[in-house]
Amino acid sequence: MKTNYKLVLFLLFISAIANAQTMNLRLSTYFYSWERADSTNPDFETSHLKGYQNMLLGVTDKSKKWSFNTSLLAQEDIVNESGDGFDYSFYNLYIKGSNLWNALDVIIGRQYVFAGVGNGSVDGLNLRYKAGMKKQYQLSVFGGALTPGNYDFQSYSDFGNNFIFGSTFNYYGDQGLTASLSYYLKRKKYDPYYAPRIDSSFLTTQELIVTDSRDQQLTGFNISYTGKQNYTLFGKAYYDIYLKKFYQAEFNFSYPIKNFRISADYMYRGAQLTYNTTFWTMAQFWPLSHYQRVEGSMDYTLKNGINLFASLADILYIDDNSLEYQLGFKNSWYGLYYIGYSGYAGESNGAVGYIYKELVRSKLSGNLTLNYSNYSLGNYSSARQDQFSGMLGLTYRPSPQFSIDAQGQLLTNMIYKTDTRFMLGATYRLFSKF
């Protein structure tokens, strides 16, 4: 079965290349080094070097209606093996048909789905039908097997109890109005296991525990609107059918006045639990926790392009609250801002600064980021701690298609006296018409 699957993938790849009109390719190779302290003996450290190879490939045929797309990551420990040593992951591997019969989009294969309330990786089929004079009515239906957790093609479970199905209806109206109604069903059956249980005679026995395959069943509604004066409204509400509760809601309003913009946000987050797990069972007897977040923000852009911004948010828990505040300035080259927290989440004051500089035009650029914070963990500890981190990077581009990146990282806090890491990599990009 596995051999046949690999053969099909190989034939699809060869067929796509043979019929290609355009090819978009990006190859990246990175080496990442660090030192790890032994948890039982902090004075003993091991050095590690890991290599990563990433490939993004997109091939489009002559009709420009069909394309082959894949994203592959391979990784291997070169010095002192950790984890699985060598490993590979196919994050995307699909064939896409675009605007077939001027009405239908088709995606077949491994893909990550963004469909309102439903998000996740699936190995299957995704259909989108577009109707109306302006194709303003669009219906999407997707489904298939759950993608294995390690993103290979060998670890599939029984499809009947491990699958995803979902649907989304989108409406794209005039004057920036969009609305969608979505549904999402996920089934995942976990492996049976033995656990100690007490029988009617109060004796401990080992019993086989078999869980239900129901995992999540959700529905949601999204709406957004952009007015003639460029003000925007956005709202959404997501409902858990198994828990019979709204677990997520959000509302945002933003209004620009020339170079000045004000925004208001409201967010509700409840516990999103997998059906029939320990936490889900406990939720039947104790009320679920939730929090709300209310935020106001403003920003102003100066004539020289610098953006000044400030925000204040109040996070409301059931019996307490926490404040979060930000103040700073930024543009595309540099920025500096202060961020603070107080209340239930703890006390924290921090600053972040970054700068990006082109050292040699179109050839060499550098970037520097510094982060400092002083914090305490609220009720857990009144002692204040310091944390500092920094990152310095260089990018060299001898040609538009090829670049070399080097980056050093430093961290010091209450857990790590010093933690240093280094990364070196190269990227090759190719876009070709045949």
Image: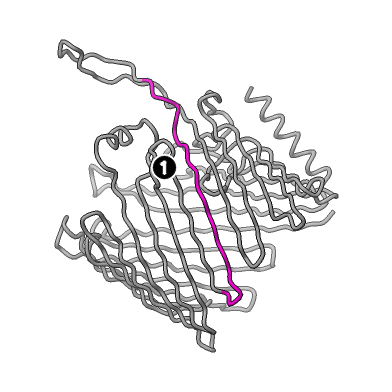
Q: Position of residue 310 (x, y in %)?
A: 39, 77
Dividing the image into 4 quarters, which one contains the N terminus?
A: top right
Compared across the picture, whether 146 is left or right of 291 comes to right
Q: Position of residue 427 (x, y in %)?
A: 62, 58
**Which residue sits at x=34%, y=49%?**
36
Badge 1: how crowded within 10 Å, few (<14), some, or many (20+)?
few
Q: Position of residue 388 (x, y in %)?
A: 31, 67
Q: Amino acid at mark 1?
A: Asn
Compared across the picture, whether 77 is left or right of 326 comes to right
Color scheme of the displayed model: one colour
Location of residue 164 with respect to 389 vertically, above or below: above
The count of marks equals 1
> Toward the viewer: 210 or 433?
210
Location of residue 150 with respect to 351 vertically, above or below: above
Compared across the picture, whether 296 is left or right of 6 comes to left
SS majority, magenta: strand
Please give the residue where the numbered disc 1 appears in the rendered image: 80
**Which residue sits at x=75%, y=48%?**
98
Location of residue 364 with respect to 206 vertically, above or below: below
> Is residue 216 located in the magenta-colored stretch of the structure?
yes
> Is residue 1 located in the magenta-colored stretch of the structure?
no
Task: Find numbered disc 1 in the image and state the secondary structure of the residue it sits on.
Answer: loop
Find residue 9 and report its image quarter: top right
**Which residue sits at x=56%, y=28%?**
154
Compared across the picture, whether 326 is left or right of 237 comes to left
The magenta stretch is 210-230
Q: Position of residue 257 (x, y in %)?
A: 52, 82
For this orientation, the residue located farthest to the bottom is: 303
Find residue 245 and report its image quarter: top left
**Which residue sits at x=60%, y=33%?**
144
For this orientation, the residue located farthest to the top is: 201
